Image (spheres, coloured by chain):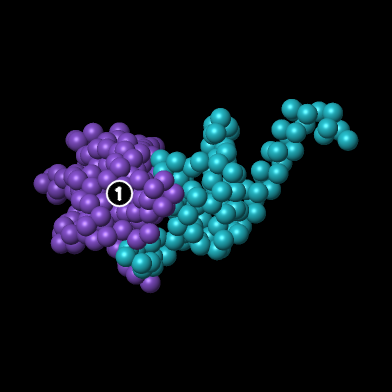
Amino acid sequence: MELTTEQLQKVEDYLNLKDITYIDLRMEVFDHIISDIEVKLVDENVDFETIFYLVTDIWDKHLKQSSSFYFGVAYTAPKIVIDKAKKYFKKWFFLILPTYFIPYFIIVKTNTFFTEIIKNSIHLFFQIVTVLSFMFFLLLLFKKYKNEKKTTYSFILKTQSLNALVGFLFLINLNFLDNDGFIDASKSGILMAFIFSTYSYFHFYKKHLEAIKKHKIS
Amino acid sequence: MGNQKLYKGSLQTIILKLLETNDKMYGYEITQHVKELTKGELQITEGALYPALHKLEADGLLAVEVAKVGNRLRKYYKLTESGTKETANKLEEMQEFLKTMQHLVNPKFSME
């Protein structure tokens, strides 16, 4: 038994109220709720309003606003979005630590072996990489904000946008040498973590575009 | 219904097996199919189904297809190539698990 346009609109309004505006989840939740209502209308012979409240009552707990340690408590979204985002983001979250510590320890262990030429070359390389990485991050930020469609990936991107500030702080002081003239291991580690975060932003931006493409009618 | 906790760890295998048999399925269809096959013994909730589907999709075991059905769009899930391989592995693991459980809970029967 197909629902009327008004009944469909009532489900749409419910999803809007719950902020299920993420295209990779909305059609799936919408279809599930409608299918459930249609089946129950036939099986239980009760009116639409009663069935609607029964079905949405089940969904309420999955659609309530939630947050996660992985993204920061300031970023909230429906629980179903947070749960999905966590599945995609978890491994990237834990990879950020080695991207800081591995270059840090390499620089600490090898710093004294560097000749002036090698040190200056590394320094110049870090400066170039900082500028390029920051510019690329800015370009991705601009492209993301121009694209108004929401997916689980765009939620992840929103939570990672502030990483651009790290690049900006590097640009203010493009010096990667410490007071003794050695390569600053700590700064090098943070720079590598920033490059990694730029790459992860690019990865999720690509996934965001793919999700938009994937959720078009085939 | 009382065995829901026992089934929980096998949800991904159940989904993969269903998709192996049915080519492509949508979320609600999976819940109803499982309910029907188990005569209501296992009822997959929305809170368990979608995280499991999204995990399988994130792991590259499931692919997604969207089609217009009646008055709305529907998202279908189907096995990818690696999903088909993983289904065979998971089913093998399940058989081993069941055999081990049989040894544990019914040693006499398993010795025959």
Q: Colour of chain A?
A: purple
- The image quadrant where one finds the C terminus of chain A is bottom left
The 10 Å Cα crowd at callout 1, few under 14, some 14 to 19, many 20 or more, is some
Which residue lies at the image location 58% right of the left edge and 32% below the top edge?
B3
- Image location of residue A148, percent across then percent down: 18, 59
- What SS does tag 1 mark? helix
Q: Quadrant of residue B95?
A: top right
Q: Is residue B107 left or right of residue A217?
A: right
Q: In the displayed image of the protein, which residue is found farthest to the bottom?
A: A218
Q: Is residue A59 left or right of residue A136?
A: right
Q: Colour of chain B?
A: cyan
Q: Is residue A57 left or right of residue A124?
A: right
Q: In the displayed image of the protein, which residue is found farthest to the front?
A: A45
Q: Quadrant of residue A53?
A: top left
What chain letter is assigned to the residue under label 1? A
Out of A187 and B44, give the one closest to the viewer.
Answer: B44
Q: Quadrant of residue A151?
A: bottom left
Out of A19 and A147, give the one closest to the viewer.
Answer: A19
Which residue lies at the image location 71% right of the left edge and 41% below the top edge?
B96
Query: Considering only vertical position in the picture, is A90 above or below A122?
Result: above
Is residue B4 something one can see in this rendering?
yes
- Image location of residue A146, percent across then percent down: 15, 62
- Image location of residue A164, percent across then percent down: 19, 48
Disc 1: which residue: A48
Which residue lies at the image location 60% right of the left edge and 59% below the top edge?
B21
Is residue A98 something one can see in this rendering?
no
The amino acid type of the residue labelled 1 equals: Phe
